[in-house]
């Protein structure tokens, strides 16, 4: 049986900077590995840990992916439940005769035979109507553009687009377009 060497009573120094310091010796891996002793119990326990890792890693991965799928499906169920509730509410509204009458009047301009309907278009003053278009100017403006870059973009864009037709199978003659 080997015994470990007794620790030296000399204080350690920070390195080989002192005048009387000995140079550091290289660590021999064989000597270090030879000093490690494995008992049968340690080897069995290490084997069990490795086996447990091999068994549990796929199981944990499956568990995590299933939990993610369950969370996504629960969110989908919540969204679908909200949509069903909205559709039920809309169905209940359409069961009301007053709502049907108001929708027929608003959307289709229906009226009862004894009613007189007045349609008012553009009831706002001209100053209150939002201006979507700028006023037309009398001066002609020239737009500066790089026509060469636009031409190159157009040609490359046309060349890189996918065709809408399915190419013929090899060996079949191409049919000309009418």
Image (spheres, grey):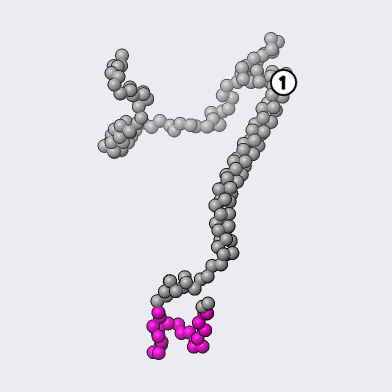
Please, what is the dominant secondary structure of the magenta stretch?
Answer: loop
> In percent of the image, x 42 and y 82: which residue is there?
15
Label 1: few (<14), some (14–19) or many (≥20) C-alpha neighbours in 10 Å: few
Displayed quadrant of residue 103: top right
- Mark 1 sits on what residue? 95
Q: Which residues lie in the magenta part? A: 3-25
Nearer the observer, 164 or 106: 164
> In percent of the image, x 48 and y 84: which residue is there?
12
Nearer the observer, 49 or 9: 49
**Would residue 86 be visible to someone looking at this image?**
no
Q: Does the segment drawn in magenta span residue 4?
A: yes
Displayed quadrant of residue 19: bottom left
Q: Is residue 53 left or right of residue 148?
A: right
- Residue at far front of view: 1
Residue 166 vertical position relative to residue 71 in the rendered view, above or below: above
Displayed quadrant of residue 49: bottom right
- Residue at far left of view: 148
Could you tell me residue 8's position as x and y percent? 50, 86
């Amino acid at each position: 049986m080997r015994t470990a060497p007794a620790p030296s009573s000399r204080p350690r120094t920070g390195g080989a900077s002192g005048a009387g310091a000995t140079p550091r010796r290289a660590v021999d891996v064989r000597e270090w590995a030879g000093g490690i002793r494995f008992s049968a119990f340690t080897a069995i326990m290490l084997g069990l840990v490795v086996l447990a890792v091999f068994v549990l890693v796929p199981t944990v991965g499956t568990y995590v992916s299933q939990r993610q799928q369950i969370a996504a499906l629960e969110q989908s169920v919540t969204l679908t439940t909200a949509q069903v509730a909205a559709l039920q509410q809309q169905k209940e509204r359409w069961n009301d005769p007053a709502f049907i009458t108001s929708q027929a009047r608003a959307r289709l301009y229906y009226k009862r035979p004894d009613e007189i309907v007045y349609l008012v278009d553009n009831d706002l003053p001209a100053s209150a109507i939002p201006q979507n278009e700028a006023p037309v100017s009398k001066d002609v403006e020239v737009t500066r553009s790089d026509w060469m870059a636009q031409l190159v973009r157009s040609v490359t864009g046309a060349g890189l687009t996918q065709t809408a037709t399915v190419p013929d199978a090899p060996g079949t003659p191409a049919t000309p377009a009418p």
